[in-house]
Image (spheres, rainbow, N blue to C red):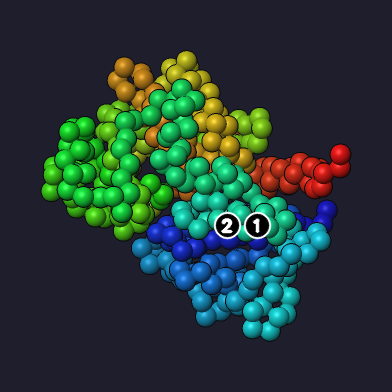
Amino acid sequence: MKKINVGLIYGGRSGEHEVSLQSAKSIYEALDKNKYNVYLIGIDKQGHWLLGDPANYLLNAQNPKLIALNKRNSSVITTVNRPEKAELLSLKTGKEMGQIDIFFPIIHGTYGEDGSLQGMLEMLNAPYVGAGVTGSAIGMDKDVQKRLLKFAGINVANFYVIKKSHFSKKTIKKILENFKFPFFVKPANSGSSVGISKAHNEKELEESINDAFKYDTKIMIEEYIKGREIECSVLGNDDPIASVPGEIIPHHEFYSYEAKYIDENGAGLKIPAELPNELTKKFQEQAIKVFLTLECAGFARVDFFLTDKNKIYVNELNSIPGFTKISMFPKLFGASGIGYSELLDRIISLALEKKKDKDSLARSYTP
């Protein structure tokens, strides 16, 4: 069989740049080189596209605190449309650097997970893995996401949204009237727990708000739900399947960025989670319902809280979840019988299937 040319896109301009590099490293190592030619397309923090050399596309690759995109040995590239494939061109010479059959964006956060990159790939008429523009944008915006989930009858924690342009001392007063400490302060558009704080008093609240506004102009105050943290992975397009649920047991106060990606002992994992069969089924059904409600495709991870009264709350959906070796998304499917490399094969196949369906649609109106 002819190999498929995969453009693995990683890095990006968000606060999750380094997480994306770790995900890309794991994916590149696991992709079957007998099936795929992999083009390593790194986007630096200034937005430049760089074509990496597999031998040295990352610096300090083994250290999550120091990992970085290697710019010296990369060629600046851009993508342009062709009838059947996207083409990589050198910005310096105009020389063709490769042709891509399918893109695999693994950029977490803004400018990669929020629909902006997906929109560009749609304009190129290029197939790509994961959710489309709508699902990506909804999945990224916690405010819009939670409003849609509430409309669908899905339990979410109470929340209050603040826009930077409307923030004042009156806002603090309103928060204190409606929420009891502790509670969370989050950027509305970020992931990997970037910019998220747990406020225990008014001083911490003001500090947390200032920190969250560093990452987004819209932030959320969210009720603290005391309970177990359960996660479930989803795979598919119109008829998705759910993995076994897993449980996160944070060793920090909550499942922070450091606990997820830097501190190897930041959290304990129970995969599968110790749940009665009835609850396991409920989590899987809820994960699929969330996935479909938010217009997702390909793959995603849904995070929940489970109270001591067995009430399930949805925390959030991640349309491009972490894909490192210690990330929950691949671990959950591994425990469900789908190994890492097979999981990547399925995700790519789902994207090609999605593109085929779109290409079958009429492009002009004939009365």
Expressed as whole percent of the image width and height from the top left, the position of residue 265 reads 32, 47
Q: Which residue is mark 2?
A: 117
Q: Which residue is mark 1?
A: 121
- From where the camera sits, is residue 130 visible? no
Q: Can you tell which mark lies on residue 320?
A: none
User: Which part of the image, by quadrant, shows the C terminus?
Assistant: top right
Which kind of residue does numbered mark 1 sit on?
Answer: Leu
As drawn, is 7 to the left or to the right of 138?
right
Of residues 115 and 299, which is closer to you in this image?
A: 115
Element under disc 2: helix
As drawn, is 159 to the left or to the right of 314?
left
Which kind of residue does numbered mark 2 sit on?
Answer: Leu
Q: Are marks 1 and 2 in contact (CB under 8 Å)?
A: yes
| Residue sitting at x 56%, y 42% | 135
Expressed as whole percent of the image width and height from the top left, the position of residue 129 reads 64, 49
User: Counting other residues with Cα less than 10 Å from the Cα at mark 1, is it few (<14), some (14-19), or many (20 or more)?
Assistant: many
As drawn, is 212 to the left or to the right of 23?
left
Determine whether 171 is above or below 283 in the image. below
Element under disc 1: helix
Of residues 321 and 27, which is closer to you in this image?
A: 321
| Residue sitting at x 25%, y 50% | 167
Question: Exactly how many numbered labels are in the figure?
Answer: 2
- From where the camera sits, is residue 276 visible? yes
User: Counting other residues with Cα less than 10 Å from the Cα at mark 2, is it few (<14), some (14-19), or many (20 or more)?
Assistant: many
Of residues 356 and 141, which is closer to you in this image?
A: 141
- Per the model, the C-alpha gap separating discs 1 and 2 is 6 Å
Of residues 22 and 172, which is closer to you in this image?
A: 172
| Residue sitting at x 46%, y 55% | 110
Expressed as whole percent of the image width and height from the top left, the position of residue 34 reads 73, 56
